[in-house]
Image (spheres, coloured by chain):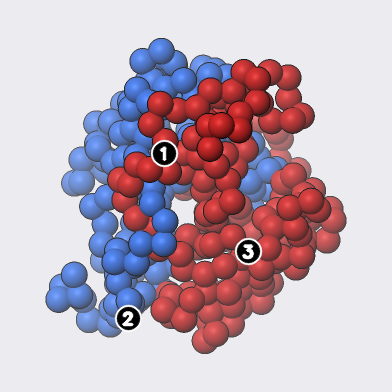
Chain colours: A red, B blue
């Protein structure tokens, strides 16, 4: 994709999309009311706008692995941003001045376009592999890679790491 | 690997390791003082035990993408747990009673064995692609998939989702 690049942007020498170090399996898909143009910028905005009708539908192969989750539980969802290019080291998102390193940005454009979001389960149908959650900032369609319990203090600190005070 | 299974464990019908929906590129490696036997169970325990000498060494192809990060900044690290089996829907970790669904556990055994951890940058060498951080709960060696800013309120809430009160 390096023929389509903004001023100041720099592509990786080796294209990450062509470097297959390991394989992912898609376990399901995210469904939401958002589309590319209407997508909120983050979960806080998504919640302020009603959540977006977030729903995960798993491939039947993976439904049994939901056993032990419960409604009202908080979980991490890992998504694969399958429409994002992967080849930029420096990029110039529209709302920022000048190019920035990819790892200093939340842009979906990254070598491995994985998005993480912490949400709360509102409805759970283990038999059919369906999770409805309180919100998503993802648009309709991306593949789901993983679901795992959200446990502050384990993957992240509830204290010293937080840059904004807890409400 | 379904020949080596504990009582009550159930493997997926289709082995996720053989389902290549997309490819990952490894962008570097995590170095730490921990090994399989000495690894802390989580980041809180890792910090209590001194952090573990956490250091990420990026492949030279990816170093430039660190531009814009800074020492003392909090980041997410995504790791590929390359020694974990991927084929269990229900599993019986040693410290729990009876089998549990994979998505209800933090076990590295999962269809896509991606671990996430939020840490603080203590030293940053962009030219050589090296990040030292305050802690890791990973053992020495796993491939790194991504580095992204840690911004409470965006990927996760600082408030209502937290199951434990912030300190």
Q: Residue at x 47, y 60 (%)?
A: A145
Disc 3, SS: loop
Question: Residue B13, which numbered label?
Answer: 2
Question: Residue B128, which numbered label?
Answer: none
A88 left or right, relative to A92: left
Residue designated by label 3: A141
Residue A128 location in percent, x, y? 55, 85
Mark 3 touches mark 1? (CB < 8 Å): no
Q: Residue at x 26, y 62 (%)?
A: B85
**Mark 3 nearby-residue class (10 Å; few <14, some 14–19, many ≥20):** some
Is residue A12 or residue A112 the one in the foreground?
A: A12
Residue B79 sits in quarter: top left
Q: Residue at x 66, y 68 (%)?
A: A31
Residue designated by label 1: A16
Mark 3 and mark 1 lie on one chain; the one further toward the N terminus is 1
Residue B11 location in percent, x, y? 29, 77
């Amino acid at each position: 994709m390096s023929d389509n690049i903004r001023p100041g942007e720099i592509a990786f020498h080796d294209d990450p999309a062509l470097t297959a170090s390991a394989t992912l399996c898609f376990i399901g898909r995210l469904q939401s009311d958002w589309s590319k143009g209407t997508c909120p910028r983050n979960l806080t905005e998504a919640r302020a706008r009603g959540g977006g009708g977030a729903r995960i539908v798993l491939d039947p192969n993976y439904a049994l692995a939901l056993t032990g989750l419960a409604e009202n539980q908080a979980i991490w969802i890992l998504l694969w941003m399958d429409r994002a290019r992967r080849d930029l080291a420096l990029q110039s998102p529209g709302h920022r001045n000048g190019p920035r390193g990819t790892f200093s940005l939340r842009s979906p454009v990254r070598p491995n376009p994985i998005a993480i979001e912490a949400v709360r389960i509102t409805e759970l149908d283990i038999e059919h592999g369906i999770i409805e959650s309180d919100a998503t900032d993802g648009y309709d369609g991306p593949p789901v890679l993983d679901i795992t319990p959200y446990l502050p203090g384990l993957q992240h600190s509830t204290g010293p790491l937080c840059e904004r005070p807890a409400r």
